[in-house]
Image (cartoon, rainbow, N blue to C red):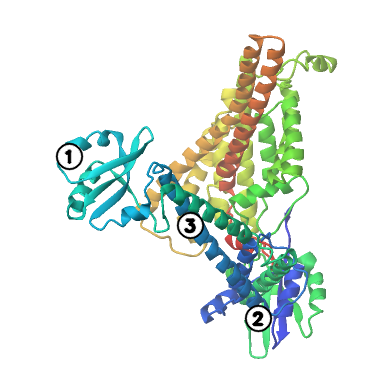
Amino acid sequence: MGMVKMKHINIYGPEQDPQQTLEVLAKLACFHPDKDAERINAAAGAAENLYTPLLASTLGLIKDVGGDPALQEYRGRFFEYGAVKDEVEALSAQVAERGKRQAEISAKLATYAQTKTQLYHLTGLHTSVDEIFACKYLKVRFGRIPKDSYLKLPYYDDHSFTFSEYDFDGEYYWGMYFVPESHAKEVDDIFANLYFERMWVPDFVHGTPQDALAQIMTQESELQAEQKELDNMSDIAAPADIERLREYASWLNYEMQIFDMRKYVITLEHTYYISGYVPESDVERLKQGLLMVHGVKACEDDEADAVDGAPDRQPPVKLKNNWFARPFEMFITMYGLPGYGDLDPTGFVAVTYALLFGIMFGDVGQGVLLGLIAYFVMWKKMHMELGRVVARCSVFSVIFGFLYGSVFGYEHVLDPMFHALGFAEKPLEVLAPEGINNILIASVVAGVLIIVSAIVTGIISNLRKHIIAKTIFSVNGVSGLVFYVSLIALLLPMLGMELPFVGSVPYLILCIAVPFFLMYFAEPLSALCAGEKPEGSVGDILLNGFFEMFDTVLSFASNTMSFLRVGGFVLVHAGMMTVVFTLANMTGGVFYVLIVAVGNVFVMALEALFVGIQVLRLEFYEIFSRFFDANGVPFAPLRISLDPAADKAE
């Protein structure tokens, strides 16, 4: 377990287009470029990538003509940029013209639908609409008026208007009112106050409402037929045309990404230069691949092989773990990768996560079922990386399930097996008073061991990076380790364990006071070890040290007590299954089986979710913070992606 060793490679080429070299690097997918060239080219001003907008237009066109816009693998066929651009623009213009016509038809159909709804209420009018509007000195208003307002119309008899209704839908009266042109403004205000909703008769409505409806239905049918023809894109792009467009898109995506890779190329007077990192196992493969490009040379840079290289040349990190720990890399990447040369915490996480999960979710039957679902459904069918993590954790659930003697919540079904093995009873009775105490004490002990392991891991990591002062004086260094272990040792008499030296005056001085003051003055001591003058006044140093140590003691206590949740979930599991069986025992027969089955599924799903989250919290907050800096750069080799937008987002 650890990291893949990286080699720094310098690639030189003659003064020519680096296209072929970049294509080879993208095909090999093992070359992580340095960022120096990108910064230099950005300052100089990068050329516009013409393939990007054309690719977007092509994918949009494929979608418009009913094709699948998903990018496919580039098969190596080359196209002329100008010819592709002309064809895509021509087809896009046809699609746009058709879309414009479809929008016009949709607008007309919407108008026809609204007009038909209104005309249906005026079918009682047998006079031609044209004749009504032909009145020279009268104004006509079509529309509807609420029933309450209609009853108020007699109060306005002294005004010069006549209202004729032709339909009543239970809420509104539909009709029209006539008013002399000279009184139109006054009467319109009256009807507006009565909530009259005016209906605007379109210019295409002629004759009686019945005649107008017939004309609209005829025109509506014609437009719908035309719309159906327009929806068929085969006359613009047949299946063969769509496939050709998809080939264009694959080529454009390829050329677009190769063009973007030019930002990692530095062009000198007579050559171009590309540098980056390659996994040690792929160096020869890279060199053999570059032999295909005439005049290109690749050489290793010994200086960059050092773990603590220059800051602007920080090697990328590619984790390398065995089959058991590899799925747990997802948790490491969620938190952040370790720096190149640091300790890889994946193995530590794999063991502690699976172990804590098994302790908190100990049940033979539920563990087996959870493992089967995780592996065959979550991983094999849904391709979720989390499925492989849960499958490994389920093995520990089964192991601790045997320790608890629990199978689908039945706490004594394994008793005959224990008797056959020579045990008087199962190893641990969870809900017994003595069992509860043992579980909670064991949880705290496990937490202490894990925290000590995390501090030791941090010490080893700092020693490998030659950070001596931090290794000695840090809270997560030797001083912190001695202080924490010594405090824990003072509590051992509460468990009936008496150690002769623990608690004596020399013990309190050497194991408590000395590490305490070393941590208290860690910053000035580290500065003095580095040959520097401590920053701040004496008062500032004392005040900062006080708050640092207050936080340290508090965090040691809270982090240790956080592991009580491990034992708490053991008790929660047994308690929830007790509730399930209590409910089942209140019934019988089929209902008993149904309640037990549903209860097991509910408890398994709920507890697996909660336990997974809680263990991850312990890893991130109580363990990682003690030794994991998470300042690594992920290994991102040049390659052609079928989802370049997602890669840029990452």
> Circle 1 — which element?
loop
What separation in Å lies between label 1 and label 2 (alpha carbons)? Answer: 77 Å
Q: Where 456 falls versus 237 (above or below)?
A: above
Which residue is disc 3 drawn over? Answer: 108
The answer to whether any part of residue 619 appears in the image is: yes
- Is residue 310 visible to the viewer in this orientation of the structure? no
Q: What element carries label 2?
A: helix
Q: Nearer the viewer, residue 611 or 248?
A: 248
Q: Mark 2 or mark 3, which is nearer the start of the sequence? A: 2
Secondary structure, mark 3, is helix
- Horizontal and vertical percent for residue 26? 72, 70
Q: Which residue is drawn at 64% across and 15% down?
A: 432
Horizontally, is 240 left or right of 230 in the view? right
Tell me which amino acid carries mark 2.
Gly
Residue 236 x %, y %: 66, 67
Name the residue nearer the viewer: 132 or 554.
132
Quadrant that contains the C terminus: bottom right
What count of labels does the image hold?
3
The disc labelled 3 sits on which kind of residue?
A: Lys
